[in-house]
Amino acid sequence: MKIQILGTGCGKCKQLTENAETAAREVGVAYELEKITDIAEIVKFGVMTTPALAVDGKVKLVGKVATPAEIQAVLR
């Protein structure tokens, strides 16, 4: 499973990254984490508000720092 964090590297993006890693570990899935910071790449996903979370190339959450529990629901 590929978890992608879309954002410029702000504090909210970093928190979303930590929460995503925590969620993936708690669910017990094998994952690869990718941070996408290039604005042009983020826009290709159709995302205009960061941070955002994508799983296997599909945007799941936009514009908020999701909790580990919220991310777990997406990963299941």
Image (cartoon, rainbow, N blue to C red):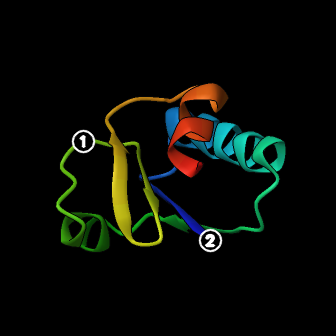
Please state if 17 lies on the left or on the right of 70 as rendered: right
Residue at 58%, 50% (x, y): give it. Answer: 75
Where does residue 26 sit, x and y in percent of width and height?
82, 41
Q: How far apart are marks 1 and 2 (CA)?
A: 23 Å
Mark drawn on residue 17: none
Pointer 1: residues within 10 angstroms few (<14), some, or many (20+)?
Answer: few
Q: Which of marks 1 and 2 is nearer the N terminus?
A: 2
Q: In which quarter of the image is the N terminus?
A: bottom right
Which one is in front, 1 or 9?
Answer: 1
| Residue where numbered disc 1 is placed | 49
Residue for point 63% across, 27% down: 69
The residue lying furthest to the front in this view is 76
Seen in the picture, residue 25 relative to 35 is either above or below; the reply is above
Q: Where does the image place residue 5, in percent across and percent down from the top left?
A: 50, 56
Where residue 50 sits: x, y (%)? 33, 43
The one of 1 and 6 positioned closer to us in this rendering:
1
Please identify the quarter of the rendering in which residue 11 is found: top right
Pinpoint residue 37: horizontal percent, then vertical percent: 44, 63
Q: In this view, does 7 lie above or below 36?
A: above
Q: Is residue 48 left or right of residue 14?
A: left
Vertical arrangement, residue 65 with respect to residue 36, above or below:
above
Where disc 1 sits, the SS reads: loop
Residue located at (20% from left, 65% from top)? 43
Taking 7 as reference, is 15 left or right? right
Mark 2: secondary structure: loop
Q: What residue is shown with label 2?
A: 1
Amino acid on which disc 2 is placed:
Met
Q: Tell me the residue at 71%/41% (across/down).
A: 23
Q: Which amino acid type corresponds to the residue marked 1 in the rendered image?
A: Thr
Q: Is label 1 in contact with label 2 (beta carbons under 8 Å)? A: no
Mark 2, residues whose alpha carbon is within 10 Å: few (<14), some, or many (≥20)? few
Give the number of the mark in front: 1 or 2: 2
